[in-house]
Amino acid sequence: MKRLFEGFKSDIKFRGAGRGRRLTDEARVPPDNTVKERPAPRKAPAGEAQIAAASAAIARLDSKQGKGKTPLKEIADPLRKDVEPGEEVEAVPRHEQSGAEKDSIYNILFRCPLTGDLLRREEISAHIKESIEMLSTADPISASIMKIHTFNKDRDKVKLGVETMARYLKNLIGNPTEDKYQKIRLSNKIFQDKVMCLEGADEFFEAVGFEKKMLALEGQDQQEEFYVFDTDALDRLNDLQSHHDSLLSGEPLIATLDRQPQIFVPSPQAAKFDLPDDFFNLTIDEIRVEQKLRKEKLQQDSMLKTKAMREREDRQEAKRYKYTVLRIRFPDGYMLQGLFYAQERLSVLLDFIRQHLQNDWLPFELFAPCGRKLEDEQATFRESGLVPSALLTFHWNEAILADVEATEGYKTESVLKEDFLSLAVTLT
């Protein structure tokens, strides 16, 4: 497979819910006075606050169980580094320079939004699942919401199921004293088809105050299983409203691509790229097909092609790559490197650069390898020809810089932050 990839690399040119009917079960059953007392359900925060609170809960559990002995630490990657709030971390471990350049600067790592751990792509699913399961002990409501939105991959089913669950809660909040809204028959077809098929739904209902009970059906001798809401919790309807809102606003936990910012001192090697296999978004079967297509392409090269044919081939070529590694060369020769998705926009790169400048308020310009000025901030890296790698050139806006230097005496000897420059390495 490596030889096939090397063949491909030689061809690379580096270029600069609809609303449903009434969802409550109509069975009317006399109130059951045998409901056990339950502790007040936890209030689940929403959005980013929910993730922050969940992370704090995991940290507390981590400290109670003993450092280095939690399930998370057992599965964590050796590259893991504990992150304090607001702390900047070095995403890529510093290998000793041994000539294996791609082992030290091209690792594709992802950061867990819940724990802050760094993960390889194949570790993400197991780590996030373990993190959420661990959170269930400290904050079952938040954990169940995360399960619903993360573990169920069919987004349409999740949307429909969440809206259905929210309707049950809304009916109870609006009619807290009506007996029919305090019960949900588990055999109800709507409940089975839209709610119980979702992983995490069962845990959510129990966490917010429902309890499974066998109740007699009205006018019948037989019994069925119901979810019955704890009547002692009816005086905490504000909490139930919060759970309702958190459920609707929940999002799947997605590990984010770590930028892995690095700085290189001026050297000829810093202008060269040696992409690893991870950059090629191909399976083994796709590689075999690609090899066949390469042979066919040799025969087609002699044929006349329309503009549409050439554009279609260009799009197929671009889809090979999921990531791009970009280096920005500054006036003093230092180079800043970051890792991005190929479909991200130029505005993301501009923000990344500003984070490392001594003066992020001064306007600057970027030029592609061909000398073309990159002006469209909404263009993707793929559209801009910056995939799978590119070496860009940084320039201050000359007119504005001249005015600033004249009025404030500003000098531009050092562009990047000094503490970041101290981490610079030499590629050999």
Image (tube, grey):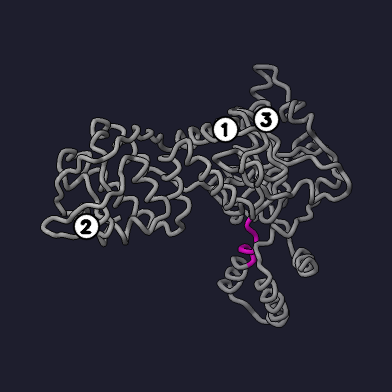
User: In which quarter of the view is residue 411 placed?
Assistant: top right
Query: How many marks are shown on the rendered structure?
Result: 3
Distance from the alpha carbon under mark 3 to that under mark 2: 70 Å
Q: Which of marks 1 and 2 is in front?
A: 2
Q: Main secondary structure of the magenta part?
A: loop
Q: In this view, does 104 lie to the left or right of 399?
A: right
Q: Which of marks 1 and 3 is in front?
A: 1
Please tell me whether mark 1 sits on a helix, a strand or a loop. helix
Please tell me whether mark 3 sits on a helix, a strand or a loop. loop
Q: In this view, does 197 lie above or below 344?
A: below
- Disc on res. 357: 3
Crowd tier of the residue under label 1, counting other residues whose Cα lies within 10 Å: few below 14, some 14–19, many 20 or above:
few
- Disc on res. 223: 2
* Residue stretch rendered in magenta on the structure: 317-322
Distance from the alpha carbon under mark 1 to that under mark 2: 44 Å
Residue at 15% across / 49% down in the picture?
Answer: 29
Residue 273 falls within the magenta-colored stretch: no
- Disc on res. 59: 1
Q: Of 152 and 351, which appears nearest the observer?
A: 152
First reached walking from the N terminus: tag 3 or tag 2:
2
Please tell me whether mark 2 sits on a helix, a strand or a loop. strand
